[in-house]
Amino acid sequence: MYILMRTSSSLFIVFMLCGYYAAAQPAAYTSSNAHSHNDYAQPVPFFAAYDAGFGSIEADIFLSGNQLLVGHNTADLTATRTLEKLYLIPLDSCVKAHHGNVYEQAGKKLVLLIDVKTEAVSTLYKLIEILKKYPSLINTPTLVVAISGNRPDASLFDSYPSFIWFDGVLSFSYPKEAMPRIALLSDNLKSYTAWNGNNDLPGEELEKIRVAIQKAHALHKPVRFWNAPDTPTAWEKLVGLRVDYLNTDHITELAAFLRR
């Protein structure tokens, strides 16, 4: 079990949170508000979203033997598609090239959202072991490694090293001890509405979404919806609702939308 030291590590978390939350609710939307959903499925994983300046990139991982393999399901897995090769090694190069920052722009943050597909505790144990091989990644305040998918019980969140964060579920209520370790709150938009993104949101469903977002922002947590319509019309509506991360499979199109 990874138990935090309650002094210096706790202070580190507080300072990280202050910086992270300060940028959580944007005055103006940029590519930092873009999330590359299932990024490994892109023709060029990592670099397409990174070069577009995305603020969040997602990788699904499976513990397979002694490796963490990346893919949507077990049929996708190959020995060459490891988390290290696709994401950690490129990130390590970027941080070293930019003097401790993920991006050339000092202070610009990136969330590496790791969706755990195999058993939570054993997969996290391996992830922590691998991350420790990259001191530049676990020590930069500009990289947030957030665990989604299969997660340990929230009561255990604060027992993990300070470089491990968690993607909370927007509709859940978490104990106060877990909240400082939650980097963002995500949810399935289909749990709130059947909206297809092409017409107006029904008033009752719109209010339900608004209330959920306001609740998250009151807790100083950024919000992401998955399974949301992935079109310019939908992005416009989600921006109006103050959703912090726009979920997309269309990197080039969303980057152009945000530039406009």
Image (cartoon, helix red, strand yellow):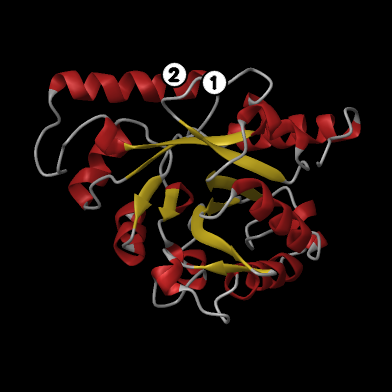
Number of residue marks: 2
User: Is 24 on the left or on the right of 98, as rendered?
Assistant: left
Q: Secondary structure at mark 2?
A: helix
Measured in 3D between alpha carbons, the distance from the residue under mark 2 to the one under mark 1, in whole angstroms, is: 7 Å
Task: Name the residue tied to disc 2.
Answer: 215
Q: In which quadrant will I find the N terminus?
A: top right
Identify the residue shown where x is 29% and y is 55%.
257
Q: Is residue 216 above or below residue 246?
A: above
Q: Are marks 2 and 1 in contact (CB under 8 Å)?
A: yes
Query: Label for residue 195?
Result: none
**Residue in the foreground of this view, choosing between 120 and 99:** 120
Instruction: Give the residue type at disc 1.
Output: Leu
| Residue 14 screen position, x and y as percent | 75, 29
| Label 1: how many Cα within 10 Å (few below 14, some 14–19, many 20+) | few
Front residue of this view, candidates 26 and 224: 224
Kindly tell me whether residue 100 is visible in this rendering.
no
- Judging by the rendered image, the residue that carries numbered circle 1 is 219
Question: In the image, residue 67 lies at what x, y percent?
Answer: 66, 70
**Residue type, mark 2 in image:** Lys
Give the class, few, some or many, for how many residues have Cα within 10 Å of label 2's Cα (few <14, many ≥20): some
x and y percentages locating residue 259 in the rendered image? 36, 55
Position of 242 with respect to 66 (left or right) is left
Q: Residue furthest left?
A: 199
